[in-house]
Amino acid sequence: MKTKILILLTLMISMVGFSQKNEIKAADKALKSGDAAEAKTILEGAKSLIDGADAKYQAQAYSILGSSYANLSEFEPAINALKKVISVEEASGKKKFTADAQQKLSQMTADIINAAVEDNNNKDFKAGAAKLYMGYKLSPKDTIYLYYAASSAVNAADYDTALKYYNELKAVGYDGSGVKYSAVNIESGEVEEMDKTTRDLYVKAGTHKDPKEERTPSKRAEIVKNLALIYQQQGKNEEALAAYEDAISSNPDDVNLILNKANLYYTMGDKDKFKELMAKASEMAPDNPDLLYNIGVISMEQGNLEEARAAYLKVLEIDPSYVNAQLNLSTSYVNEGNGLIDEMNTLGTSRADTARYEELKKKKDDLFIEGSKILEEALKMNPDNEGVLAQLKNIYGALGDNENFMRIKKLLGE
């Protein structure tokens, strides 16, 4: 009886082995004939048999399955299948299909990146990010893929994924700086970028001229800035501040990091800290009119009109045509004049009240006139600016200056 059972079991194992061989042979034939979908269907249907097979058949089956997935642009299962080939053969010590699997994985990287570029061009940023990350995992030395994966995730508003990728970039010490090599194509006259070896060969061959090398800046500050912005988006302001502190400690001369940190404090409602950092940024970049303008805006919001005016005047020293600074400088005088109206409205008809009323009215009118002078100067450089014209019209209307009021109305086409 025992002998019969043993013979039966041996027969069953042989039949299973025979079935595995047939399935693998059929799938291989289908793949070679160009029918990757059929090869995939055959092997997926026989997966339980294949997983129970010895290493030789497993490796061969997963090699065919990986190639089938790859031909169908099903990248993730293709990678998993080809990695299974490598792991199975590594465990068995027999590496018949490993080299081929490694070569296919290497070739697939380019296909995945090209597919990711197509996804991004089609605005499918989430799919593009996933493929770029897949490309990075296949080729970890190409950290640029991880950088682009993070950018795509941001474009997809998938901030959790972007955060993961940016933190990974930070962990691997990604810098992103490098050198761009270029030369002018003599035939077309266009500047072409290429690797150094190719560029030098083309110049030597006489097809290109004017070789140039341009160093690209580090992207570390940008990565930390994006980390902080994502934390802000998620309402994690303390984490965002910590990210900026980290970045600034490594890049103390980067004025943009100071600005971003200042803007974070502004969104948190800490305008004093915002103003302090903006002043620091302004010292670092004294010729940047935008910094000074923002200092003026916050000073106005805080009611510090003299500080605001000083900031706007510095802006106009640097850029006399900075129309928003002109408008806000004018507004600072108009707002101060409007601030007097409340007291004017509380006064009675006594001689003292009448005298005070006339005093306040003259002061108000003088402030309005000062505001109008600034805008008249602005109009010389920006004659069609509707914001300037509209504010001038309102000032002249408040002053009762009908002649100038009608002049500005005409310029507005009213």
Image (cartoon, rainbow, N blue to C red):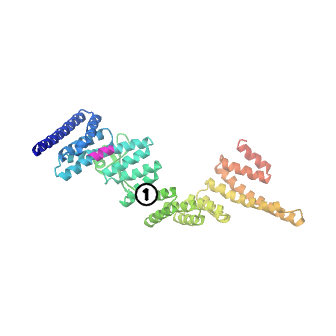
Residue at screen point 54% across, 60% down: 264
- What residue is drawn where x is 41% and y is 56%? 164
Residue 375: give x, y in percent of width and height. Answer: 69, 53
Asked whether, in this view, residue 402 is left or right of residue 87, the answer is: right
Q: Is residue 284 above or below residue 35?
A: below
Amino acid carrying mark 1 in the image: Ile
Q: Residue at x 80, y 52 (%)?
A: 400
What predominant SS class does the magenta segment belong to? helix
Viewer-proximal residue, 237 or 11? 11
| Tag 1 residue | 223
Q: What is the secondary structure assignment of the residue under circle 1?
A: helix
Start-end of magenta stretch: 75-81
Q: Is residue 102 visible?
A: no
Q: Position of residue 197 (x, y in %)?
A: 28, 50
Q: Residues within 10 Å of mark 1 (few under 14, many from 20)?
A: many
Dividing the image into 4 quarters, which one contains the N terminus? top left
Residue 167, given in percent of the width and then of the height, sits at: 40, 58
Taking the magenta stretch, the answer to whether it contains residue 42 is no
